[in-house]
Amino acid sequence: TDLGRPFLTLKLAESLDGRIATATGESQWITGPRARRLVHAMRASHDAVMVGGGTARADDPSLTVRGLGIDRQPVRVVVSRRLDLPLLGQLARTARDTPVWIAHGRDADPFLVETWRDLGAVMLPCDPEGAHLSPASVLQALGGQGLTRVFCEGGGALAASLLTADLVDELVTFHAGLALGAEGYPAIGAMGIERLAAAPRFKLASHRLVGQDLMTVWRR
């Protein structure tokens, strides 16, 4: 793109009321098998699949494309300022087989940076911004590595920071027909918005039924 950064699609799979997990963290599975299969196909059409550190800790995801019989796997990107990620998790165990790139703070513990590098991960130092990483810095680092299309799967804190920074080009939501209530984990974390005029707005591009779930595509 002419953006000087990859085109970013943010995907959220949530309950009717915008929750991605119960209060105890249970999230498998909010959406049905057809929606999950479609997400695998969407992963396959991107250069990279990206999640925040909280999702990597809570879900221990593999982030690979499964069940479609494809050879090429997208790069798996984790955004974690402090590298407080499970060293025995799926990403750590498979970093030599399928690429894992970690965007981390320039102030991260050098021992952890070295440990992940030894496990086979590509380490991308990025600029801190508040308690997290600057999302613009993360996308610039990914663009610098030649990525053009990134598929972000949350969680809430990363989704909020990308939206706040106006870096989301396309938003894809899957809504399932269940309600989890206010104590559930929100799909989008705190954004500090006080006025509607300050909220990022998207225009509806398409919507369709996928199994029992409603898929909606919004564009910048």
Image: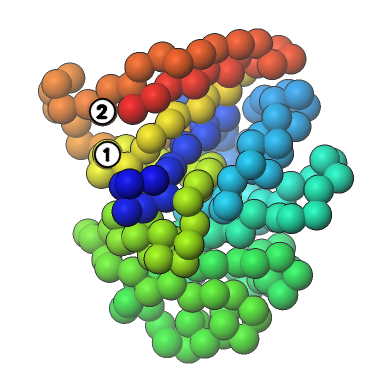
**Residue depicted at 64% across the width and 36% down the height:** 42
Looking at the image, is mark 1 or mark 2 earlier in the sequence? 1
Q: Residues within 10 Å of mark 1 (few under 14, many from 20)?
A: some
Q: Quadrant of the C terminus?
A: top left
| Residue 147 coordinates in the image, percent (x, y) | 49, 57
Q: Is residue 99 above or below residue 197?
A: below
Q: Position of residue 109 (x, y in %)?
A: 40, 83
Q: Please tell me how crowded label 2 is: few (under 14), some (14-19), or many (20+) other residues with Cα within 10 Å.
A: few
Q: Is residue 180 left or right of residue 120?
A: left
Residue 197 in picture, x, y percent from top left: 14, 21
Q: What residue lies at 54% left-to-right and 12% top-to-bottom? A: 207
Q: Nearer the viewer, residue 45 or 35?
A: 45
Identify the residue position indicated by label 1 in the image.
Answer: 166
Q: Is residue 162 above or below residue 105?
A: above
Q: CA distance from mark 1 to mark 2?
A: 7 Å
Horizontal side, residue 8 vs residue 119: left or right: left
- Residue 36, how many percent across, how many down? 71, 32
Q: Amino acid at mark 2?
A: Pro
Q: Which residue is mark 2?
A: 200
Front one among 101 and 131: 101
